[in-house]
Amino acid sequence: MQVLSFTGGPFEENGYLVVCPATGAAVVVDPGAQALEIVRALERRDATVEAILLTHAHIDHVEGVPRIREVAPDAPIFLHEADRPLYEGVPQQAAAFGLGVPALPPPDHSWSHGDTFRFGECAFEVRHAPGHAPGHVILVAEDEGVALVGDVIFQGSIGRTDLPGGDLRELMRSIREQVLTLPDDISLLPGHGPGTTVGRERRGNPFLIPHYGGELA
Ligand SMILES: [Zn+2]
Ligand SMILES: [Zn+2]
């Protein structure tokens, strides 16, 4: 599994292009303001987008969906049902941040916790991890040593919970039960900022360590 990261826009959001090298099957995860760069990378590699996978429906993670759909009109969009109201409220999110946003096509499939999403010879396990957003999921490929964690956890930080539908207690439970249950050497690729690992955050994330006032051991 090849995971390529693209960063763009005022939120410096990370969108990902994930390619199964054996077959050329690709998925785009959280296309945001950098979607055009993802499209160019797709064209360079001659990869086929089989789906658009959304960790959650904040505007910076979904605003590039129409641009991906221009080159992959049949690629189904996956989003957890609990984030559907946020997705439908993207015009209001845009207005709140003073941004314009194109009309978004409706999601085609709803994630369920425990789903396995397969493309080519690759697969993600879907884990519901609410708290930053009610329908947030993380996409885990444990055998590949990687997890796309959206805005659940960052290098040295955690997702904000002051936006509509946010819940700090729920976020901490998601981190404890869905992220810290993974092996230490798993790479965590977040929605903002650099990648990290489970072990690094388990040992050093100040939001998680009681010594620093965090909640988790
Ligand atoms: Zn977010
Ligand atoms: Zn974000």
Image (tube, rainbow, N blue to C red):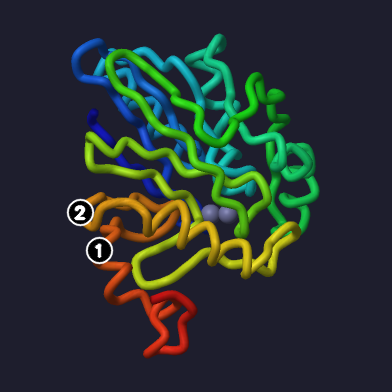
Tag 2: Cα neighbours inside 10 Å, few (<14), some, or many (≥20)? some
From the viewer's side, name the closer residue of 118 and 63.
Answer: 118
Vertical comparison of 18 with 94: above or below: above
Please, what is the three-letter code of the amino acid marked with disc 2?
Asp
Q: Residue at x 60, y 26 (%)?
A: 66
Q: Quadrant of residue 34?
A: top left
Q: Is 201 on the left-hand or right-hand side of 27?
A: left
Q: Residue at x 29, y 24 (%)?
A: 19
The numbered disc on residue 185 is: 2
In this rendering, the count of numbered labels is 2
Whether ligand 2 has any atom under 8 Å from the Cβ at mark 2 is answered as no
Mark 1 residue element: helix
* Residue at mark 2 to residue at mark 1: CA–CA distance: 6 Å
Is the C-beta separation of discs 2 and 1 under 8 Å? yes
Please, what is the three-letter code of the amino acid marked with disc 1?
Gly
Q: Quadrant of ligand 1?
A: bottom right
From the viewer's side, name the closer residue of 113 and 148.
Answer: 113
Whether ligand 2 has any atom under 8 Å from the Cβ at mark 1 is answered as no
Q: Earlier in the sequence, mark 2 or mark 1?
A: 2
Vertical comparison of 73 with 36: above or below: above
Q: Residue at x 67, y 25 (%)?
A: 107
Image coords of residue 182 (percent x, y): 32, 51
Image coords of residue 8 (percent x, y): 43, 49
Q: Is 149 on the left-hand or right-hand side of 76?
A: left
From the viewer's side, name the closer residue of 85 and 111.
Answer: 111
Image coords of residue 109 (percent x, y): 63, 22
Q: Residue at x 57, y 48 (%)?
A: 60
Q: Quadrant of residue 197?
A: bottom left
Vertical comparison of 80 with 70: above or below: below
In the picture of the structure, the residue carrying the numbered disc 1 is 199
Q: Which quadrant is home to the N terminus?
A: top left
